Image (cartoon, helix red, strand yellow):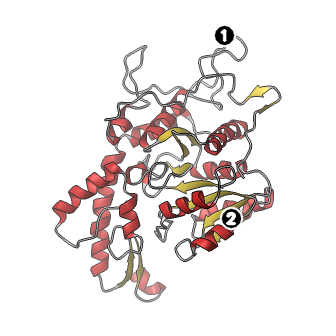
Amino acid sequence: MSPHIINGVNGHPATNGFDGDVTASPSQNPSDGFSTRAIHVGSEPSTETGAVIPAINLSTTYKQDQVGVHKGYEYTRSSNPNRAALERMLAALEDNGGRALAFASGSAATASVLQSLGTGAHVLSINDVYGGTFRYMSKVAAQLQGLEVTFLDFDMTSDDDVVAAVRENTKLVWIETPTNPTLRLPNIPHITALIRRAFPAATRPLILVDSTFLSPFYISPLAGPTHADVVLHSLTKYINGHSDVLMGALIFPKAQSGDSDALYQKLLFIQNAHGAVPGAFDAWLAMRGAKTLALRMREHGRNAVKLARALRRNKHVKEVIYPGLREHPGNKVARQLLSAHAKKFVDEWERADGETVGDFPFGGMVSFRIVGDGGAAERF
């Protein structure tokens, strides 16, 4: 079911003339924590100047000693030192992250993934997927690629019906966690285990998790218990965190399965072919923003719990939707999904909290419904 690798056209190899991997993460100390990786990976001291922050490399063209023989860079659309440094850092932030691709936007990353499936493919998607993703699936890919999409409510669909929804041409399962803006949290580990158990590796669809709302701090979809094939982020939101960069990314696991590796190689080629790349300055800004990701996500979580609790007590509020609240239907799944560093933070927070047992920080997004009509919402 997985797409085939494009090996190049017109005599140009998919490696763009370089046999190395400029996006590969350098070896890391296993004891390095999340913030240490965010600060240092991709920002290794310059061997030329000793600078601990990478310079902004605006060159579009790089010297080649011979045709196709260069130092890893030949044209900035194919690769750029700032983008490569950002990709190394993004891979390091995801537990079990191996490689990453940075795109001009989250929508560009979404479009590239769906384009990689080719024509006549089928996708199994969560039913309240992000509106931009739904738009591209139903209004663009459906018309240009003949893409077929089945939108499922994974919370209300039986295991048998989920398996039955997978067709011979199903190439991808698209999951969002939590969803935007209803903050539903499907049992992703159960879904991924079900797909892996029901279909042999050679025929099963790939599994993508859009983890934008939680960032790599709160959950690690590439690692256990989820074991997704690829993670998507809109860096525009939390990872950059400063409202001054438009960017997206795809991150792939260390232990490359054949299908996941094929997808990475194909997306690398597609990205270079249609140019959905971020600029060097944007890549530099995103690296700057990500260095404080852990600090910001902890504060987002603390503030979100306070806000959710205050809204829960308000007589004008009909429902508060926050997976960190004990009454949220996905609360137990949220706790199961916590990454090791997020669990440590949550445990410390709970010991100091002293309020409702079961509430805990789980991202910074809160949704709520007002009692009454639209006018009541405006007055509120």
Residue 166: image tag: 2
Say which amino acid is labelled 1.
Asp
Q: Position of residue 271 (x, y in %)?
A: 67, 40
Disc 1, SS: loop
Badge 1 or badge 2: first in the primary sequence: 1
Farthest-out residue, right: 10
- Residue density around tag 2, few if under 14, some if 14–19, many if 20 or more, within 10 Å: many
Location of the C terminus (image quadrant): bottom left
Work out whether residue 356 or residue 82 is closer to the camera in this orientation and state it. 356
Quadrant of res 365: bottom left
Q: Is residue 49 above or below residue 57?
A: above
Could one spot residue 238 in this view of the protein? no
Q: Position of residue 227 (x, y in %)?
A: 50, 51
Work out whether residue 56 or residue 4 is closer to the camera in this orientation and state it. 4
Which residue: 57% across, 71% down? 159
Which residue: 64% across, 67% down? 163
Q: In the figure, is residue 47 to the left or right of 254? A: left
Residue 65: image tag: 1
Q: Is residue 61 above or below residue 177?
A: above
Q: Is residue 271 above or below residue 217?
A: above
Work out whether residue 295 or residue 283 is closer to the camera in this orientation and state it. 295
Which residue: 54% across, 33% down? 83
Q: Position of residue 110 (x, y in %)?
A: 63, 52
Could one spot residue 185 in this view of the protein? yes
Farthest-out residue, bottom: 372
Farthest-out residue, top: 65
Disc 2, SS: loop
